[in-house]
Image: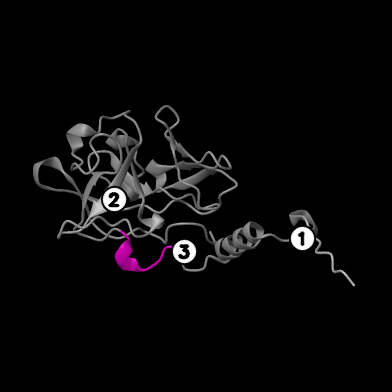
């Protein structure tokens, strides 16, 4: 008796490899399971901040290079030995600068001359924050349109995100450079509010 090999189209299996992988990722995100990775991969006190992208990537970020009302800036923390902390996507940092008097009183200790640093990872489903409106003073995630108020400690202005963006405390370094003054105020990435 001849055996006929029948190929089953992907949709008849019910699950393909991609569906399984995406499901596992979603489960980890929903459970808040250690997404940020080891603490040594995240920015640490004493790190300096450098530009993360563009033609000037790797150059130190200075206060002079961040005007009030300027663009959103992607930053990378560099440890005292010169090693970039890029081993985890949760180490991504964004910077914005507002007038110092626009920063909430309880957040002023984390800022330097109106410059605020926050996690670049949305707390809803882990997309990268990429929008900034100086007029409304809101950061936005284009995946699901959550909005955050950096001058109010990353507070959620519009969901579906429920957890605020973690703030990265800053200090002024030599020559007006920006330094990390401490770790993120909360764990970066999705998780409970």
Q: Is residue 96 magenta?
A: no
Q: Earlier in the sequence, mark 3 or mark 1?
A: 1
Q: Is residue 39 magenta?
A: yes
Render colour scheme: one colour
Q: Magenta span covers which residues?
A: 36-42
Camera-nearest residue between 63 and 15: 15
The span from disc 2 to disc 1 (Cα, nearest Å) is: 49 Å
Residue 72: image quadrant is top left
Q: Residue 78: where, in percent of width, then height?
A: 22, 54
> The residue tagged with tag 3: helix, strand or loop?
loop
Q: Position of residue 165 (x, y in %)?
A: 44, 51
Say whether residue 161 is left or right of residue 170: right
* Image position, residue 37 (x, y; %): 40, 66
Q: Which residue is mark 2?
A: 110
Residue 101 sits above or below residue 17 on the image: above
- According to the image, label 3 marks what residue? 35
Residue 51: image tag:
none
Closer mark to the observer between disc 2 and disc 1? 1
Whole-percent x, y for residue 64 in the image = 18, 33
- Mark 1 is surrounded, within 10 Å at the Cα level, by few (under 14), some (14 to 19) or many (20 or more) other residues, namely few
Which residue is more in the foreground, 127 or 115? 127
Residue at x-position 39% and y-position 29%: 134
> Considering only vertical position in the picture, is 163 above or below 41?
above
As drawn, which residue projects farthest toward the bottom?
1
- Can the viewer see residue 105 in this picture? no
Q: Nearer the viewer, mark 3 or mark 1?
A: 1
Say which residue appears at 51% left-offset and 68% top-offset: 33
Q: Which residue is mark 1?
A: 14
Tell me the mark number nearer the camera, choosing from 2 and 3.
3
């Amino acid at each position: 008796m001849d055996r006929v090999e029948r190929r089953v189209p992907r949709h008849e299996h019910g699950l393909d490899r991609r569906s399984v992988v995406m499901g596992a990722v979603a489960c980890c995100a929903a459970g808040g399971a250690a997404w940020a990775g080891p603490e040594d991969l995240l920015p640490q006190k004493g790190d300096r901040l450098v530009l993360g992208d563009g033609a000037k990537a790797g150059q130190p970020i200075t206060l002079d290079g961040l005007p009030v009302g300027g663009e959103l800036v992607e930053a990378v923390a560099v440890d005292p030995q010169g090693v970039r902390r890029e081993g985890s996507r949760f180490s991504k940092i964004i910077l914005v600068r507002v007038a110092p008097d626009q920063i909430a009183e309880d957040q002023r200790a984390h800022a330097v001359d109106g410059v605020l640093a926050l996690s670049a990872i949305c707390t809803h489903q882990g997309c990268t924050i990429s929008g900034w409106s100086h007029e409304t003073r809101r950061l936005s995630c284009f995946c699901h349109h959550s909005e955050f108020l950096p001058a109010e400690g990353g507070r959620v202005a519009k969901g579906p995100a429920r957890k605020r963006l973690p703030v990265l405390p800053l200090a002024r370094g030599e020559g007006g450079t920006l330094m990390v003054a401490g770790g993120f105020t909360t764990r970066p990435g999705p998780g409970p509010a």
